[in-house]
Amino acid sequence: MVLSLLDVTRRWHVLAAAVLLLAAPAARASSLVVGKLAPPITLTTLDGQRINTADLRGKLVIVTFWATWCEPCREELPLLSRYASEHKSQGLVVLGFSLDPPDDMAKVRSVADTLSFPVGLLGDPHVPGYGRIWHLPVSFVIGRDGRLLDNGWKDKQPAWTSARLRQLVTPLLDHAN
């Protein structure tokens, strides 16, 4: 089989694009370093409000990614909602990004109506600075100064529990960081 220069060039471009596509999420996620500034992310809530983490300086922020079809998410969300309600006055903000497709909006709204924090559809599992959201649930904690305090990708079991919230988040609420 003889390939023309044009065929070789096309194959090279396809291969290069595939490599970049595979490497890009990992490269973006590698910027998530505890102690460094967290990449800003904007939640567009189900009612159209826009909340950007960069505008929440002075607050402790938990960014959580979930879906209605995710069994661990169904266990975690009510716990996180109660915790958010209990600690709102201490400056805790939780933002919930659903990975559900727009066709499942009724399901997302049904869950969102039970939560104490704002929810929106993510729209694209590739989140600049956070990489591709590939397993759920996963959360990130951003300090009052905008620095990443907990990187959800580092944990094999990232789901929140009461004990993990008390151990990781409660001390951050008690002290300005």
Image: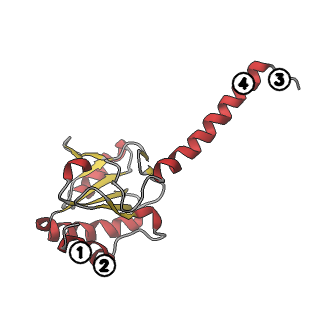
Measure the C-alpha gap from mark 1 to mark 3: 63 Å
Q: CA distance from mark 4 to mark 1?
A: 56 Å
Up/down of 147 relative to 2, above or below? below
Residue at the spot 43% in from the left edge and 60% down from the top edge: 136
Mark 4 surroundings within 10 Å by alpha-carbon count, few (fewer than 14), some (14 through 19), many (20 or more):
few
> Which amino acid is tagged 4?
Thr
As drawn, the label of residue 3 is 3
**CB contact under 8 Å: marks 4 and 1:** no
Number of residues whose C-alpha sits closer than 10 Å to that of mark 1, classed few (under 14), some (14–19) or many (20 or more): some
At label 2, the amino acid type is Gln
Q: Which residue is mark 2?
A: 167
Q: Report helix, strand or loop for mark 3.
A: loop
Nearest the viewer among 148 and 18 is 148
The CA span between labels 2 and 4 is 55 Å
Look at the numbered discs 2 and 1 and tell me whether their residues touch, using CB distance below 8 Å.
Answer: yes
Tell me how far mark 3 sits from mark 4, CA to CA.
10 Å
Q: Please say if 3 is above or below 176.
A: above
Relative to 96, is 88 above or below? below
Crowd tier of the residue under label 3, counting other residues whose Cα lies within 10 Å: few below 14, some 14–19, many 20 or above = few
Q: How far, Cα to Cα, is label 3 from label 2?
A: 61 Å
Camera-nearest label, 1 or 3: 1
Q: Mark 4 vs mark 1: which is more N-terminal?
A: 4
Does 75 appear above or below 116?
Answer: below
Badge 4 is on which residue? 9
Amino acid type, label 3:
Leu
Which residue is under mark 1? Answer: 170
- Mark 3 or mark 4, which has the lower sequence index? 3
Horizontal and vertical percent position of residue 44: 25, 43
Q: Nearer the viewer, residue 155 or 171?
A: 171
Q: Secondary structure at mark 2?
A: helix
Q: Earlier in the sequence, mark 1 or mark 3?
A: 3
